[in-house]
Image (cartoon, rainbow, N blue to C red):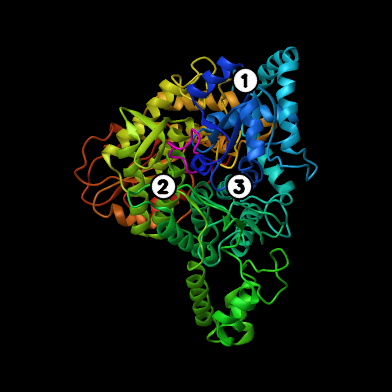
Amino acid sequence: MANHLAGETSPYLLQHADNPVDWYPWGEQALALARRENKPILLSIGYSTCHWCHVMAQECFEDAGIAALLNRHFVNIKVDREERPDLDQIYQSAHQFLTGRGGGWPLNMFLTPDQVPFFGGTYFPKTPRYNLPGFTELIPLIAQSYLEKQAEIGQLRLSLDEALAAMQPDEAAEGNLDASPLAGALRYLQQAYDPVNGGFGKAPKFPRPMDLEFLLRRHAASGDHDVLRMARDTLRAMARGGIFDQLGGGFCRYSVDDRWAIPHFEKMLYDNGQLLSLYSDAWLAAGDPLFRQVVEDTCAWVLREMQAPEGGYYSALDADSEHVEGKFYVWDRDELSALLTPEEYRVAAPAYGFDLPPNFEGLHWNPVLAWDLARFVAEQGLGEAEALLASARRKLFAAREQRIRPGRDEKILTSWNALMIKGMARAGRVFGKPAWQASARRSLDFIRREMWRDGRLLASHKDGLSQFNAYLDDYAFLLDALLETMQAEVRADDVAWARALADVLLTSFEDPEKGGFYFTSHDHENLLCRMKPGHDNATPSGNGVASHALQRLGHIVGEVRYLAAAERAIRLFHAAASSQSAGYISLLAALEECLLPPLIVVLRGRGAEEWLHKLNGHYFPRAIVLAVPAGIIGLPDALNKPEPAHVNAWVCSGVSCLSAIDTFPALLQVCSNTENII
């Protein structure tokens, strides 16, 4: 018999709709029941492509005995963390306070009826294992603790309130801002860098696109080739490793080893959107053809598997297939021998590491790019090696396509779509691929059509239903994506939409007293606390992206309100960014352009598209290039430049503007100027 999740659209909640646990979605029905019956709440947060969520579901939530205990003692609430990141932020922070450890998913928190957590953890096995208590024994103890320790729980509420308040920034920096956090972040990354395998620190290794983009920007500003080398070698290692799907394109979530060989196999939209932007920029900065191949393969995967017919991008692919992690992606020797000719195998085996001992659980191979093709051809004299490898790859991909596929979460999330819109649009602009830009435009149009209602965004769409009051990340990331798509094509309605998004950020999210932006809007549901996050996680901080995008939009349209709001946020987080600079990389991008404003380059006249195309072949991270079409109306005065017969460029940085530039070499020199180095 289905529980209360049967009417939901979230794939994660529907995975639990037939559990014997009497799950409720988060909402007043469940919360009122807990208050009325004075029952504690089990709040279980996860997402549909989470491997350990599946494991705990199979071990615990599908078990009739455990379900009976949970139904007797608790009101049980399931939450999709991708739909409700507001709840996930709060209770991940509470978990850290209660346990002193980092969180993760599944997150299982036990709350009082008024939503105060008093015990929690992540994955719990059915019986004691991995040095973890068994869920079967734990449930009665937690229920008894709730009944017998009300005084302690009340005191815990006070301590928790103080701890959550201490996590929020308090005082804004006064006086002149300085670049010291940039130097601090660079020192940290240099110290944490792995010179052997690339990346930072030890396993598990995450892509960390914000850190690598920061290194590219530092190189562009200073010309420091050691900084470029760190970024380039890390990106090469990732591209050659098993974290990148060598047959189908796209990156998995992270590598479980130091060498990027074995991933956690789930593919997330937000990782790949950021990495498309990063590899496109890295190709401009370093010129490595491998980076172009990564972009092409990843864009092909996005178009093939991740874009809905209606235009939006799906959220994720599962790590598991047939309840086994990685089964869709790995190979055994018999399969390889049956599929490939001896000549193809002779090339494919050393190319993908099949001639080495199995690298996945000692039994199977997860393909890695084990050697450089051009070098192999030169050394071995195999003139047909490239064609043979291409043939082998096609055969392996076609055979893999016949396997049972991992599950796909078909929610369309505004914030994650925005990251992919930016990635596809930037890749299309850098490599001159209209199809990629058209893909980004289709998603953007979908969000405007289905998720922009009466001047406000909604956060999630599934099965024809858009819902959930949008969060800071939705507005900030979408504004940032619009600024990228404008650099491919300037449309008056996009400029107007960008201004509307910025206005909502100021009126509905900004703290009018201290500055900075809350994660939830002023009219959002009242929760245990209201977070104002500045620290980056797997996605960049909403405060960092909002500050950066507002500054850029403010310079483009000449709106000082946006510039002032961005500076207030930068000042609020400046102390935290100074002491923990590596955790605030997205905010440092805003600080860079607060200290040294971006170049706003407006092109008009016949030949503007040609100049735009040429500039797109250079890595100028400070430059925002806008080719304004002839006859366009409805633009702000700052973009309404004269329309000459031959292309001219108007370049401004802050309040300083140059005279119109009428030759491309002169414009290139201006954009290349790094005289003002932070």
For residue 484, the mark is none
Q: Residue at x 48, y 63 (%)?
A: 297
- Please, what is the dominant secondary structure of the magenta stretch? loop
Please state which of the two labelled residues, at mark 1 or mark 3, is closer to the viewer: 1
Q: Residue at x 39, y 54 (%)?
A: 429
Instruction: Determine contact: label 3, label 2, CB under 8 Å.
Output: no
The picture places residue 550, in percent across and down from the top left corner, at: 44, 32
Q: Confirm whether the magenta stretch covers residue 224.
A: no
Q: Secondary structure at mark 3?
A: helix
| Residue named by callout 3 | 54
Magenta part of the protein: which range? 1-11
Q: Mark 3 to mark 2: distance in Å?
A: 30 Å
Q: Nearer the viewer, residue 199 or 528?
A: 528
| Residue named by callout 1 | 39
The picture places residue 138, in percent across and down from the top left corner, at: 74, 32
| Residue named by callout 2 | 421
Q: Residue furthest left?
A: 631
Q: Mark 1 to mark 3: distance in Å?
A: 26 Å
